[in-house]
Amino acid sequence: MTLHEPTPRPPLILCAEDQEDLRADICDELRESGYAVLEAADGEATLQQMDACTPDLILCDINMPGLNGYGVLDAVREHRPHLADTPFVFLTALSDPQEVVEGKRLGADDYLVKPIDYDLLLATVDARLRQVSRMRDKSNHELQELRQAMGTLRQEASQQAFHAATRVLNLVAPGMVLLDSQGHITFVNQRARQLAEASDALQLNKRFSATGAMARRLRESIASATQASRQGEEPVFSLRLPHLPGSHELLVLICALGQGRETGGEDASVVVLLSAPDQRLPLPRGILASLFGLTPTESRIAMALLEGLRSEEIADQMGVSPTTVAFHLRNLFQKTDTHRQADLIALLMAGSMTAYLEEP
């Protein structure tokens, strides 16, 4: 009997349009081209559809009753970070340049002007989906290389070779702690030890632990990451721990390495990355920009995230509005093919580590 690969699901398009006949025509064109389609007749229904599923692209009319297209876009960019890399295309009967400027400022990816040219519609949808696919493949490749390297490091047969390799990680700017499948510490770099010594809330003994209100959440996150790694999964968990008096919290990222696929779940492991909030990473300006193709403003925001700053703190620091920061964050999500801020910071940390490890 011949075994066939499972058929990949078609991309899911959410079409929000209050004109019923037009919405039906658009959806028919999309379905005939092989897309799966969800429909919404107004802004509130659009948000309800997004809460029930994750579309691959959103087509949204601007002038809908109640919550208009701008309101839908704002809700997506501000409150649904998992849709940060989902292309958002406005449908509008107006070709006023100011409408285009306003939509771009809020984070729209493209515009289609009514009456709809269906060839242009299908070409726009296809181009935006291919762009996201390319970014996703690039980011997944980079993250997989990091995880494979760390998995190889953990599985070195020679203890001497393991220690020789891990000495290099003392050059890495973020603090790093490696945990085995039992949650026991197998490696701590110098930066992690420094952060632990300076923090009353962080403890590095046999296990990685915390005191105070966040202790339970830290234990649960490590346990979840360890279980996920046994199953070959690779989620990232984030939380903040109290640090020095009068300073920001310590940013903690807990990354499952997904060892289950290679080891059958016998030696699952987790890496914990620590970032000091008020100490800038000593990365040469432009390193992250060259790694991920960032603009100068995106690079500044990326560095601020690595310092542990929140979006509103970044806005104050840069003297811009929170909406502007959200716009650039969305671009960062797109360029790194990440969906959540925790995943973005983990990838940025991985990029900074790569920069250090590649320097002569």
Image: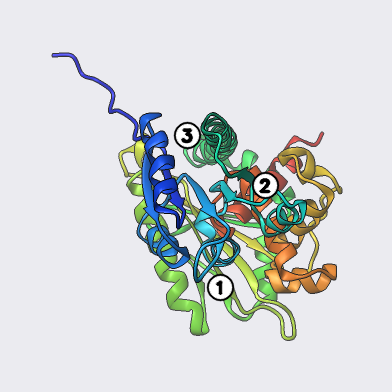
- Displayed quadrant of residue 48: bottom left
Q: Secondary structure at mark 2?
A: helix
First-in-chain label (2 vs 3): 3
Q: Position of residue 32 (x, y in %)?
A: 36, 30
Q: Is residue 246 above or below residue 103?
A: below
- Displayed quadrant of residue 259: top left
At label 1, which amino acid type do we have? Gln
Which residue matches tag 3? 157
Identity of the residue drawn at 56% across and 40% down: 143
- Badge 1: how crowded within 10 Å, few (<14), some, or many (20+)? some
Q: Is residue 206 left or right of residue 341?
A: left
At label 2, which amino acid type do we have? Leu
Identity of the residue drawn at 53% across and 29% down: 119
**The C terminus, quarter of image:** top right
First-in-chain label (1 vs 2): 2
Whether residues under marks 2 and 3 lie with C-beta atoms below 8 angstroms apart, the answer is no
Identity of the residue drawn at 71% across and 73% down: 312
Query: What count of labels does the image hold?
Result: 3
At label 3, which amino acid type do we have? Ala
Q: Position of residue 29 (x, y in %)?
A: 41, 34
- Displayed quadrant of residue 219: bottom left
Q: Secondary structure at mark 3?
A: loop
Residue 169 — which label? 2
Q: Is residue 263 left or right of residue 109?
A: left
Which residue matches tag 1? 203
First-in-chain label (3 vs 1): 3
